Amino acid sequence: MAPSAACSPHAPGADAPPTCEVPHFPPVRVRGGRYGLSRLVRHRRRAVAAGLAVTAAALVAAGPGDTERARGRPGDPAPPGSAAPAADRPVRTQRAAGLVTAPVRIADAATVRLLRPGDRVDVIAAGETATGGAARVVARGARVTKVPEALDDPAGSGALVVLSVPRSTAARLAGASATARLAVTLW
């Protein structure tokens, strides 16, 4: 009789162990595969977008605010709709683009004592010898940034005030102060 296939030592599957259940495991992910470059680009875009959002929020928080409103004097009532009196609000120290600070000597020291940081003034050159003594406006709407303490000067050479003006106006102020007496008018 011929040997059966089940008893044959060389039959396929005869020496295999009994079957058992394979445990569940998560799929294996290979880093740096073919999608690595697109993932890197996607995350870089997110990082740039987050950086732009933070920058925009910072610019809005430190924005120009209400720069056209006039500053009040100590003791003035608060403007309608404002929470704090005018004297309690700090004067902005941030300069707009293209502005420089120019120290200007005003002929009348008593007029300078009326000025406060944040005021807007016109600077007038009077008594110029080169133009025949005609008065002319040298700077319009210059913002007062600082009024230094007056020194006891018996010669009466005026008082110093620091203005924030465009660079071209600062050059005109320097030229006019060399040849004329300067005065200011408050806005």
Image (cartoon, grey):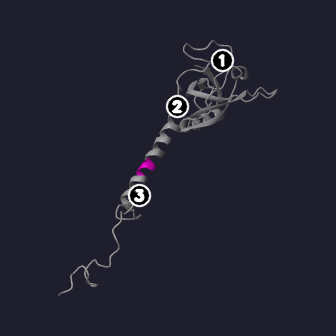
First in residue order: circle 1 vs circle 2 = 2
Residue at horizontal 50 percent and vertical 34 percent from the top? 60
Between 33 and 142, the one lying in front of the other is 33
Magenta: predominant secondary structure element?
helix
Query: In the picture, which quadrant includes the C terminus?
Result: top right
First in residue order: circle 2 vs circle 3 = 3
Between 55 and 73, the one lying in front of the other is 55
Please check the rendered image and state whether residue 46 is part of the magenta-colored stretch, yes or no. yes
The answer to the question of whether label 1 and label 2 lie on touching residues, with beta carbons closer than 8 A, is no
Q: Is residue 114 above or below residue 143?
A: above
Residue 127's x, y, as percent?
63, 25
First in residue order: circle 3 vs circle 1 = 3
Where residue 69 sits, quadrant-wise, is top right
Residue lying farthest to the bottom in this orientation:
1
Disc 2: which residue = 64
Q: Is residue 119 left or right of residue 20?
A: right
Disc 1: which residue = 73
**Res 40 label:** 3
Where residue 90 sits, quadrant-wise, is top right
Where residue 7 sits, quadrant-wise, is bottom left
Q: Secondary structure at mark 2?
A: loop
Q: Secondary structure at mark 3?
A: helix
Residue at horizontal 77 percent and vertical 27 percent from the top? 150
Which amino acid does the dot numbered 2 rest on?
Answer: Pro
Task: Specify start and end residues of the magenta stretch as a single range.
Answer: 44-48
What is the distance, in whole Å, between disc 2 and disc 3 at their CAs? Answer: 37 Å
Which amino acid does the dot numbered 3 rest on?
Answer: Leu
